Amino acid sequence: MDLTETVTGPCSLTADDCGAQPRPTADPATWRSRTAKRDRSGHSPPCNGVTAEEALRNRCAPEAAGVTGSADASAPNAPAPPGPSDPEATVEPAVSGDGGGLIRADGQGGQRSSSSTAPKGRSAHGTDAPRTTTRSREPALPCPDEGGSPLSNPGPPRRPPRPQAPEPERWARAALTRLTEPGDAAVGRTIGRLGAVALVDAIRAGAPPSLLELSAGRLDAYRARLRDIDPLADLERARTRGGRFIIPGDPEWPSQLDDLGDGRPVGLWIRGSGSLRMLALRSVSVVGSRACTPYGRYVAGQLCSQLAERGWVIVSGAAYGIDAAAHQGALAVGGITVAVLACGVDVAYPPGNAELIERIAAQGLLVSELPLSTHPNRFRFVLRNRVIAALTRGTVVVEAALRSGALSTARRARDLNRHTMGVAGPVTSDLSAGVHALIRSGAATLVTDGAEIGELIGSIGEDLAPRRSGPVLPRDLLEPPVARVLEAVPATAEGAPPERLARQAGLSVDDTLKRLYELGSLGYVERYGAHWRLVRRRRPAGP
């Protein structure tokens, strides 16, 4: 037996919107469109203070909306339309003409009643019969949604869910990225001992320096800066700009950064669609001088193109010179590249590489320890080099002077037991002096192409470089006795007799003659009277 319930509530729809019989109009199209809104059974659709479209959805999908109109008379086993004589049905009272509350059977306004009926006659909706609704446990009828499947939108549209608030650990670390400088070992030790949330709360509450193991002046500066920091706003800005903030423990966090110990990043701001952890599993960093030579720019681009074609991810710093050439070499062959910045991921620095940085964000990743809108300084460039060294399997230095910052990346990689490689340059170039010093001291391995780099940092037995050898000449394929006889033939016009050739080759005369005829058939020597001489090959005529 169907469960019934009176549906009441304030209604702001006109009679035309509810599907009641409209008055004739001069336009037949308008008449047909309004008449089409009527229910299949001839009754008006339910009205509960909603729009006509929502009323239609409620009628077609009772399980989604909880309320249905009367059933179609043509459906099998369908109950008869409810009426005043149906004991299972309830009649909805009429709504007052001024759009106010419902009028009960006793004539008083108030809550809806399951037994009240509307007086006969035309109601405020413009219908001649009272409206009835029933609640059914039967499956919902397909609702013919416009432009979609019958069940694509069974109920009223819902508001999109609000983004969840970040967990305390995330917003605390986001605040610390704006509060402290990257690579601060003292802050890292305190985070490891107390946790990021406790550290931020202790700074705000004015904890004693002995508890946090930080100086009093440092804590006072942190406390003053903490008043102007809004980590939730930073996280929201990063999300709206296509970025995110990852922290240790996230699935995307690269575990190799833990090799930095207390100096590991508090968190990383990322802009791009790839997973940093997955991309860093097979990555190599290529660094060098900003004021590079054409030779260094060409070599860096070639190395990175070859590495990208072999499936390696190129990591660099998006600076001028070798860094830019490394990123461009990977992008040129459709490879993936990651730029570790010394500023916010929304800051294009240097400005001359703004277009390149946007390409990296679209085709790779932008990574930074610093929050959005943060500008670089000299010390931050050196500090970000440790992230480049720890993130990858190895570091390649293309060009670097004796005081180049690229050497700090190589030293970091060596200290972290990463492969350190160098590309030799002209001995007369000062920009290659630093690389030559690394190679000479044994701190770096000499490499010349992408295959040799992949062999050093790749999997054992899988990323082997092809064996190199010079060209093989036909003369190299001769047997040793034949080669000795050929070496004994003088390069003169008259040649030499077989007896002299036998003495020089260390063979008998008969054996020497056999070897000479073999050489003659191969086109190396010819007989000149009683002597043997070399065949003079004519040089091709010049153009």
Image: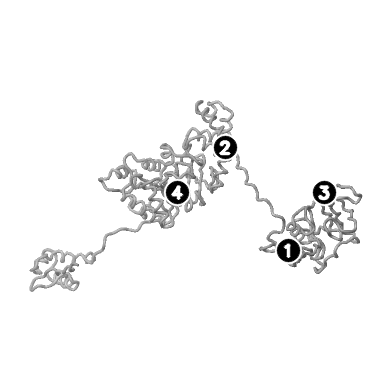
Residue designated by label 1 = 142
Cα distance, mark 2 to mark 4? 27 Å
> Is 275 situated left or right of 449 in this image?
right
Q: Is residue 462 visible?
A: no
Residue designated by label 4 = 357
Label 4 neighbour load within 10 Å: few <14, some 14-19, many 20+: many
User: Label 2 amino acid?
Assistant: Asp
Q: Mark 2–mark 1 contact, CB under 8 Å?
A: no
Sooner in the amino-acid sequence: mark 3 or mark 4: 3
Residue designated by label 2 = 230
Sooner in the amino-acid sequence: mark 1 or mark 3: 3
Residue designated by label 3 = 100
Asked which secondary structure carries label 4, the reply is helix
Cα distance, mark 2 to mark 1? 49 Å
> Is 11 situated left or right of 485 in this image?
right
Give how far across and how far down residue 102 sits, in percent: 85, 50
Q: Quadrant of the N terminus?
A: bottom right
